[in-house]
Image: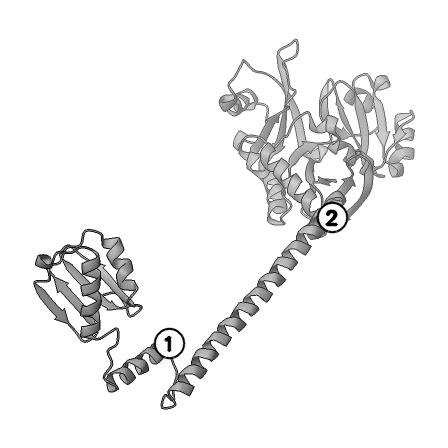
Amino acid sequence: MRLVLELPDSDTDVWHYALINDAQALVRHDFCTLDLLPASTDLIAVVPASRCAWHRVNLPKTPAARLRLALDGALEERLLDDTQDTHLAVLDDAKPASDGGIWVFACQKPWLVSRLTALQEAGRGATHLTTQSIPGEAAEARIGGDETSLCVTYCGPAGAWTMPLGGVIHSNLVPDADSTRWVSPPNLAANAETLLGRKVAVESWAVALAACAKSSALSRGNLAQFELSRFTASGVVQRLQKWLHELCFATQWRPFRVGVAMLVVANVVGIQVLAHQQEAALSAKRRAAYDSLTQIFPDVKVVIDAPVQMQRQLDLLRRSKGSLGAGDFESQMNAWAQVSAAAGVPSANGPTAIEFDGSGLSLKGVRVADVAAATRAMQGFGLDAVFEVDTVRIKVAGSGQP
């Protein structure tokens, strides 16, 4: 869907729009505020004919980077406003004619910027800027205004302009009036025919506005050029926006959206169920450890870390019975003796100093060739060992760094 939006000539919250489908047929049209505009893949902003002008200029071959400066110099004496307050643009298909001239679009910049800014702030940035009156090969004169004050907008080989319509003035305003296609909205057709003395084709405002979004019209170029190009997306961004919009709203993508939604819901539910199961299993293990500790050692009234408290109680019980635990000096020395013998550490290379802090053993002056094998062997005794340059530090496994 394409949304064609006429930029309001005066300050108002009501905007005129026409919605057309991919077959370029008018779907509906209405007047509404920006927040009520229908969804669309593209938004074509249309400058009213009364707000723009076209100038014929002759330019030498100019690089694109210096085109704006060249246009300023060519039109400086012909514009009513200062060039800094005037937006200028050229058509994409603008090629110098036999006289070397091209058509240049001109519009009051502050007014145009305010309208395009309003669209951006409403989240409906324009993807294309055009106007209803563009010079071309086919001549057309469109009646506008109201029943008491008619005007005519001409566009054709001679240019494009809007002027009041009255008496026989039209013959001077419209070159070759007999070969020009005269068009009028239904409510002005009778007055126009009486004033002009000729038949006019009846075409509603909405149909005329929708014609601005036809591919043949858009192919002539985007008028949001130079400093106003920031108000319309680049080609890549336009295609990405269109694809995302179709993905989110187009009917043909509905099965995909439903499938993705179901997949997301299934994953969320599955993750929640798995998390609940894991939490339940972990809670069961905690409860089993708690029950084991309190049943084996009834004197323990407060359980904070069941495995640590269990080990502590076992060590106390072992000591009270005269048994050695992994944290005792004798157990650690015995383990080291067996590991060093298996690792081939010569007895002459025994420790030069031994330190024991009540839970860990430090052996100085010891060098081991196969550190990895000795580490694994110590783990078999429930001990952790760290081998430094000439020192071995031993502690009960899981009690922290030696």
User: What residue is disc 1 on?
Assistant: 307
User: What residue is disc 2 on?
Assistant: 255
For residue 9, say whether it is visible. Answer: no
Residue appearing at x 69%, y 39% in the figure: 42
Left or right of 172 in this view: 100? left
Between 113 and 239, which is closer to the camera in this rendering? 239
Q: Amino acid at mark 2?
A: Pro
Q: Residue furthest bottom?
A: 299
Q: Position of residue 215 (x, y in %)?
A: 73, 29
Location of residue 24 by image quarter? top right
Numbered badge on residue 69: none
Residue appearing at x 59%, y 23% in the figure: 78
For residue 131, say whether it is visible. Answer: yes
Residue appearing at x 75%, y 30% in the figure: 214
Image height of 329 relative to 181, above or below? below
Image height of 206 relative to 394, above or below? above
Q: Of circles 2 and 1, which is in front?
A: 1
* Quadrant location, the N terminus: top right
The image's colouring method is one colour
Q: Position of residue 395 (x, y in %)?
A: 24, 68
* CB atoms of marks 2 and 1 within 8 Å: no
Q: Position of residue 149 (x, y in %)?
A: 81, 37
Q: Position of residue 66 (x, y in %)?
A: 49, 22
Residue appearing at x 26%, y 63% in the figure: 378
Left or right of 330 in this view: 63? right
Between 176 and 5, which is closer to the camera in this rendering? 5
Between 230 and 78, which is closer to the camera in this rendering? 230
Q: Amino acid at mark 1?
A: Pro
